[in-house]
């Protein structure tokens, strides 16, 4: 059985996943690692961003580790063949409905944030984004031409109670192992799905998690509070679209987009999908300067959440923190190390 399916993808994806391979062979050389094309590179080779074979292998692996997808080369491809469509199909095909996006400010990097040090120092937020529903997938959707010649675009935001409940459960469980607080973000003041979201979270809290502190916050206010006083948050649970936006905002607070991993999880016992939060970064592709830490920390999350190797995850995390404390820096965080040298610094700590 494949332990880890690597999907390097596009842009800097292959550059950073190559470093994951090096770290993995140092840390856990018993892992069975497979690799497949994904995103634009899969489209170029096979005519589809995610082939049936690759999805089947993903479903049969213990963990899937992705680099990044997308880039200007595929911007004009039809929507269903774009690299991003491959990613959405992978998420639904693996049924990974809960997306854990940590925003952690490493002490060594507190000055790299665009916010003041005292606002972000020690920041440790976990955003739990619903990942397989909402407006990303709701029907009907499309662009039609009206009788008067205008065009009309439609997207549909839709959630069921079970979709809201299962992702909220993940948030409450996580909070118990952290600072025991969940903030649920929606727009219940204007949206029906927002109102349902609030009702379902409130009921689940009362039934199974009364010991956890629950707070409801409108998503626009949450966006503001994130830059005003981000340390008030512990776990934030929110829908697919708000989670997409709030997680980018939270990542920027830490000053290190190149450092943040993510984990997408489904039902217990099913494989997780792990990916750096950064994108394919066409502007620096091929230059050997991409920061590999987000990918390496995504592997750390895979060890912890899907491979049952929390011991190795702890060692890897300590090695990353140690390398940063020693001053190891790629250009995105103010240094001069290459992608490979940054991985060397982590491997040296192992
Ligand atoms: C993300 C990305 C994706 C999303 C894109 C690439 C489809 O922005 O993972 O946050 O919108 O979910
Ligand atoms: Mg995004």
Image (cartoon, rainbow, N blue to C red):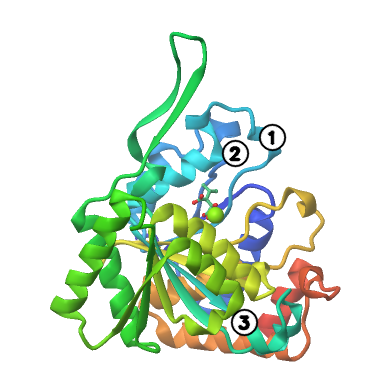
Tag 3 and tag 2, C-beta contact below 8 Å = no
Drawn side of residue 83 relative to residue 346, left or right: left
Is ligand 1 closer than 8 angstroms to the Cβ of mark 2?
Answer: no
Q: Which percent across, then down, holds residue 35?
A: 52, 53
Q: Is residue 176 above or below residue 127?
A: below
Task: Classify residue 85 as left or right of residue 106.
Answer: left
What's the distance in space between the residues labelled 1 and 2, CA to CA? 8 Å
Nearer to us in this view, 134 or 308: 134
According to the picture, the residue beneath numbered tag 3 turns out to be: 105
- What secondary structure is marked by label 3? loop
Which residue sits at x=83%, y=76%?
335
Q: Callout 3: few (<14), some (14-19), or many (20+) C-alpha neighbours within 10 Å?
A: many
Nearer-N-terminus badge (3/1): 1
| Precedes in sequence: disc 1 or disc 2 | 2
Alpha carbon of mark 3 to alpha carbon of mark 2: how far? 32 Å
The residue positioned 56% from the left and 33% from the top of the image is 43
Residue under pointer 2: 40
Residue 327's place in the image compared with 59, above or below, is below
Residue 278, above or below 255: above
Which residue shows up at 52% across the image and 63% down it?
Answer: 246
Residue 73: give its label: 1
Q: Quadrant of residue 207?
A: bottom left
Give residue 153's position: percent from left, percent from top.
46, 28
Instruction: Specify whether residue 350 is in view.
Output: no
97 to 37, vertically: above or below: below
Query: Is label 3 or label 2 in front?
Result: 3
SS at mark 1?
A: helix
Q: Residue furthest front?
A: 189
């Amino acid at each position: 059985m494949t332990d880890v399916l690597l999907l390097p993808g596009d842009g800097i994806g292959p550059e950073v996943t190559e470093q994951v391979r090096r770290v993995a062979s140092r840390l856990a050389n018993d892992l069975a690692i497979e690799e497949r094309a994904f995103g634009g590179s899969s489209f170029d080779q096979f005519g589809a961003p995610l082939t049936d074979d690759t999805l089947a292998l993903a479903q049969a692996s213990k963990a899937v580790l992705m680099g990044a997808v997308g880039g200007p080369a595929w911007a004009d491809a039809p929507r269903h063949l774009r690299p991003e469509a491959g990613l959405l199909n992978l998420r639904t095909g693996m049924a990974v409905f809960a997306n854990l996006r940590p925003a952690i400010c490493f002490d060594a990097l507190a000055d790299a944030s665009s916010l003041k040090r005292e606002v972000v120092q020690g920041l440790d937020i976990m955003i739990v984004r619903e990942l397989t529903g909402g407006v990303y997938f709701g029907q009907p959707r499309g662009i039609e031409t009206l009788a008067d010649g205008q065009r009309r675009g439609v997207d549909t935001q839709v959630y069921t109670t079970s979709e809201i409940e299962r992702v909220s459960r993940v948030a409450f469980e996580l909070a118990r192992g952290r600072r025991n607080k969940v903030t649920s973000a929606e727009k219940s003041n204007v949206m029906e799905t927002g109102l349902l979201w609030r009702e379902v979270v409130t009921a689940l809290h009362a039934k199974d998690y009364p010991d956890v502190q629950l707070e409801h916050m409108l998503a626009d206010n949450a966006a503001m509070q994130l830059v005003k006083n981000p340390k008030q948050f512990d776990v934030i649970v929110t829908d697919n679209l708000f989670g997409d936006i709030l997680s980018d905002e939270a990542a920027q607070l830490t000053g290190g987009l190149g450092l943040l991993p993510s984990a997408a999880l489904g039902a217990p016992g099913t494989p997780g999908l792990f990916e750096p939060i950064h994108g394919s970064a066409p502007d620096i592709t091929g230059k050997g300067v991409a920061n590999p830490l987000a990918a390496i920390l995504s592997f750390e999350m895979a060890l912890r959440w899907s491979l049952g190797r929390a011991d190795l995850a702890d060692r890897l995390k300590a090695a990353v923190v140690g390398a940063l404390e020693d001053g190891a820096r790629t250009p995105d965080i103010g240094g001069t190390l290459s992608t490979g040298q940054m991985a060397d610094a982590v491997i040296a700590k192992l």
